Image (spheres, coloured by chain):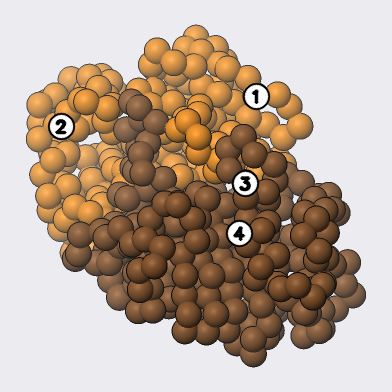
Chain colours: A brown, B orange
Amino acid sequence: MRLLLISNSTNAGEEYLDYPKIEIRKFLGDKKVTGLFIPYAGVSITFDDYTKRVKERFNEVGHDIISIHDAEDPVSAVKNAEAIIVGGGNTWQLIKMIQDNQLIEAVREKVLNDTPYIGWSAGSNVACPTIKTTNDMPVVEPDSFNAFNLIKSQINPHYLDKNPDGHAGETREDRINEFLIANQDMSVLGLREGCMFRIEGDDISLIGTRPVRVFAYGKDPVELNAGDDFSNLI
Amino acid sequence: MRLLLISNSTNAGEEYLDYPKIEIRKFLGDKKVTGLFIPYAGVSITFDDYTKRVKERFNEVGHDIISIHDAEDPVSAVKNAEAIIVGGGNTWQLIKMIQDNQLIEAVREKVLNDTPYIGWSAGSNVACPTIKTTNDMPVVEPDSFNAFNLIKSQINPHYLDKNPDGHAGETREDRINEFLIANQDMSVLGLREGCMFRIEGDDISLIGTRPVRVFAYGKDPVELNAGDDFSNLI
């Protein structure tokens, strides 16, 4: 299985999808790949505009995309894809449209059979067993919280250490601790912005300059760095 | 209908439920009321501990609570309640347990028949038509996103103007705009910390020193202050 799971598309102050583009190029290789883009997480951008934006960045690094929203039969489009590319946005709309279009099993089977998968933000979240560690507002109601279930743990993308000063709402860590109490057999990977996992079968690496904060029920959180062993978690 | 819908239990640096306690006393009146407390949103606190904490604060202002988790029949407990008090925590566990215990209709009917309702944070969110404007992590999966539907709009509690510096994730306003695109006939009331709505039939007042940010599809957000007219929104 080959996955590139990216925390966020864009770091503050940078161009869209700029910081991960070199890793996307390396992950897809030197030969041009035309990936199937799933833009369903785009709520405040049209699927056409979203596809254009992502296509430009992929072209820049020698690759290309076509979008599933232009396909007559989304399941066939998945079956024929050279790579699966799932963009960020709203996780709830993303998973709802994935489920409505019967894509859970199609994508899962395809990726288990070694078609490369690239996701960022919501697109990394749906690679997990469920979407229960999303940060997004539940603006639509999907049939279920189940997702592609490609890795063992839950990623929390855009992992954030602190609230703004003076804000009394739960911190991200508080929220993840609630998840663990309700889901005691799961681990959560707090993937900070600017970071990603590259998974090549059993070879799992963290790329980025910040550690991942790993949460498990009844244990103190642990910070793991690039070079550490993630094999029990992914 | 009588509702006191509070953004948050506790302001940063203050004691639990301290800032709203005087408004709770005024809302319940001079004669001692023993409210029915619904502690289901408590995930990282036991229901017993949560109840004790809230009871202390209510006692301080001359009122009392009993908790629904101590009742043999939760629906009967609602039917016999002098007031309904719904505490904050995780909105998902709260709505799931409300639904699992068949309380949606029971509470709605009771409150429509003028039993006072007090909610804070998640407890204000469930007074709305749905929980689709929660900030909480979906740690458990409820049967539906439908809630008590006591007011016309969606409250976003703990409304927050900015992300921490350097964080590229969606702002609260971005998330609410996604909600509006997906739910174009609804309005959202961004209720900042330290603020609450007091609703006495048609008499609706905002209490607190900060304005409410009001969002509607296709319109610029508006800031409404104490003294402004909320009758079209609540």
Label 1 secondary element: loop
Q: Disc 2 and disc 3: Cα gap in Å?
A: 47 Å
Residue A134, given in percent of the width and then of the height, sits at 49, 57
Residue at 22% over, 26% down: B13
Q: Disc 3 and disc 1: Cα gap in Å?
A: 26 Å
Residue under disc 4 on the same chain as residue under disc 3? yes
Q: Nearer the viewer, residue A169 or B51?
A: A169
Answer few, some or many: residues within 10 Å of disc 3's Cα (few below 14, many 20 plus, some between 14 and 19): many
- Which mark lies nearer to you, 4 or 2? 4
Residue under disc 1 on the same chain as residue under disc 2? yes
Relative side of A65 to A228, left or right? right
Chain hosting mark 1: B
Q: Disc 4 and disc 1: Cα gap in Å?
A: 30 Å
The residue that label 1 is drawn on is B221
- The kind of residue tagged 3 is Thr
If the image is split into quadrants, where does the N terminus of chain A sit?
Answer: bottom right
- Which mark lies nearer to you, 3 or 1? 3
Residue under disc 4 on the same chain as residue under disc 1? no
Q: Nearer the viewer, residue B152 or A89?
A: A89
Q: Of label 4 and label 3, which has the lower sequence position?
A: 3
Relative side of A87 to B49, left or right? right
Chain hosting mark 2: B
- The kind of residue tagged 1 is Pro
Residue A197, given in percent of the width and then of the height, sits at 50, 66
- The kind of residue tagged 2 is Phe
Relative side of A146 to B64, left or right? right
Q: Disc 1 and disc 2: Cα gap in Å?
A: 36 Å
Is residue A104 at all visible to an observer of this figure? yes
Q: Nearer the viewer, residue B76 or A142?
A: A142
The residue that label 4 is drawn on is A120
Q: Of label 1 and label 2, which has the lower sequence position?
A: 2
